[in-house]
Image (cartoon, grey):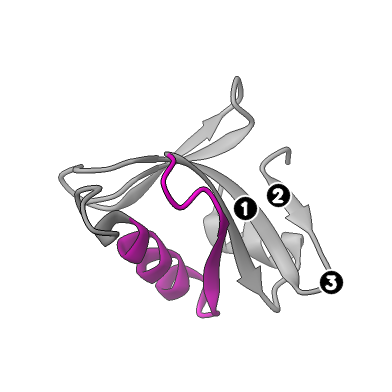
Amino acid sequence: MKFLKETRDGTIILIHVQPKAKKSSIEGVDEWRGRLKVKIKAPPVEGRANKEVVRFFSKLFGAEVAIVRGDTSREKDLLVKGLSAEEVLKKLEL
């Protein structure tokens, strides 16, 4: 999968975020961008969308998640600490 990169610290997921959605959810893969499409309920104000992204993915994976690139962009890189790309893909159920 283009949107996953395994590192020694865990797995990096490349995502494209759409804020202010009705509910937070994963919408599939954007093949053109090579990123996972994610809808987030929170607005992009005062870091709320970023907090919701981290909370949503931490709950999904049961692991620590951090934004490593793209704090002010819709395109973000997330690090899921301690999980392999295979484990991440399994939990995403794509």
**Residue occupied by mark 3:** 8
Residue 23, relative to residue 11: is it above or below? above
What amino acid is labelled 1 in the image? Ile
What amino acid is labelled 2 in the image? Leu
**Residue occupied by mark 2:** 4
- Crowding at mark 2 (Cα within 10 Å: few <14, some 14-19, many 20+): many
Task: Determine if the magenta segment contains residue 61.
Answer: yes
Left or right of 29, for residue 17: left
Q: CA distance from mark 1 to mark 3?
A: 14 Å
Task: Determine if the magenta segment contains residue 66.
Answer: yes
What amino acid is labelled 3 in the image? Arg
Mark 2–mark 1 CB contact (< 8 Å) = yes
On the image, the x and y values in percent for residue 11 come to 71, 63
**Residue occupied by mark 1:** 13
Residue 71, relative to residue 27: is it above or below? below
Kindly identify the residue that appears in the image at 38 percent across and 59 percent down: 53
Of mark 1 and mark 3, the one earlier in the sequence is: 3
